[in-house]
Amino acid sequence: MNSLILGSIPQLPLAHWIDNFVDWLVQFTGFFNAITNFIGSINNAFQWVFDLIPIWLFIVLVLALTFYVNRDKQNWGLLIFELLGLLMIWNLDFWRDMTQTLTLVLTSSLIALVIGIPLGILMAKSHTAEIILKPILDFMQTMPAFVYLIPAVALFGIGMVPGIVASVIFAMPPTVRMTNMGIREVPNELIEAADSFGSTEWQKLFKVELPLAKTSLMAGVNQSMMLSLSMVVIASMIGAMGLGTKVYFAVGRNDAGNGFAAGLAIVILAIILDRLTQSLTRSHRK
């Protein structure tokens, strides 16, 4: 009975509508080429710096940064892990792949922050904006990551840029949500005190709200960075280079050894980035 009722209802041409919308967007090749060149320049700048720094100096800089952000409570176990982990990546000849992966993560995280923090501020300041953006953020977070690859390839082609675009879409919601939450959690007493001293909205934002929301902001940075890193293997399917490509090729060749080795390198990089951003969050909290 139910099948008869459903059979009499015409099928909603949702896929056709989306195809038409993507075809309409493809017409603006100049706009998307400009975005491709802009994102590509950021990505190339990061990669140029990583290629310029000798491997031994890169390891020393990572250890020095870890030592500095944990200067009040040194975590020697983390320093030893970073040293051994980076040396192992170097020994396995994954260094160039690791820097390409790090470039993808840093570029997508940077773009996610540049877009996400203003959106989070807008949500915190406008109830209407919050009502509009919340379901959009829910959609962005719950949509399977593979789906983002299809329009990314159609609009930006093959390579690192569509992988970065897909990573930004997937990783941006935590930054927006944590920025919104951090600003909304600023005590009203401090806002009233700022108002009593004649502070403007911009002064309240930059001198009161954002400084007090730093802990939430850094937590959003941590989550966005981890989500960007989780897109590494998926982005390799559309030409994004790095450790994800090694894993993707190993799956296609049923090469368990190389796949596990590349996956372990991704885990090492993920732990280092996670611990560094967490340490920065603790330093802002003090």
Image (cartoon, rainbow, N blue to C red):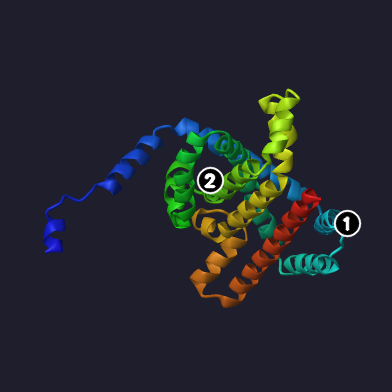
Name above or below for residue 47 compared with residue 62. Answer: above
* Residue type pointed to by label 2: Val
- The residue pinned by badge 2 equals 165
* Residue type pointed to by label 1: Arg
Residue 150 x, y percent position in the rendering: 42, 50
Question: Which is nearer the N-term, disc 2 or disc 1?
Answer: 1
Residue 66 x, y percent position in the rendering: 82, 57
Q: Residue at x 78, y 65 (%)?
A: 82
Q: Residue at x 70, y 32 (%)?
A: 192
Q: Does residue 264 appear in this view?
A: yes
Circles 2, 1 touching at the beta carbon (< 8 Å): no
Q: Secondary structure at mark 2?
A: helix
Q: Residue at x 58, y 59 (%)?
A: 230
Find residue 24 and report its image quarter: top left
Name above or below for residue 212 compared with residue 71. Answer: above
Tell me how far mark 2 sits from mark 1, CA to CA.
Answer: 36 Å
**Dot 2: within a 10 Å radius of its alpha carbon, few (fewer than 14), some, or many (20 or more) residues?**
many
Residue 53 x, y percent position in the rendering: 80, 51
Give the number of the mark in front: 2 or 1. Answer: 1
**Dot 1: within a 10 Å radius of its alpha carbon, few (fewer than 14), some, or many (20 or more) residues?**
few
Name above or below for residue 278 compared with residue 124. Answer: below
Q: Does residue 160 appear in this view?
A: no
- The residue pinned by badge 1 equals 71
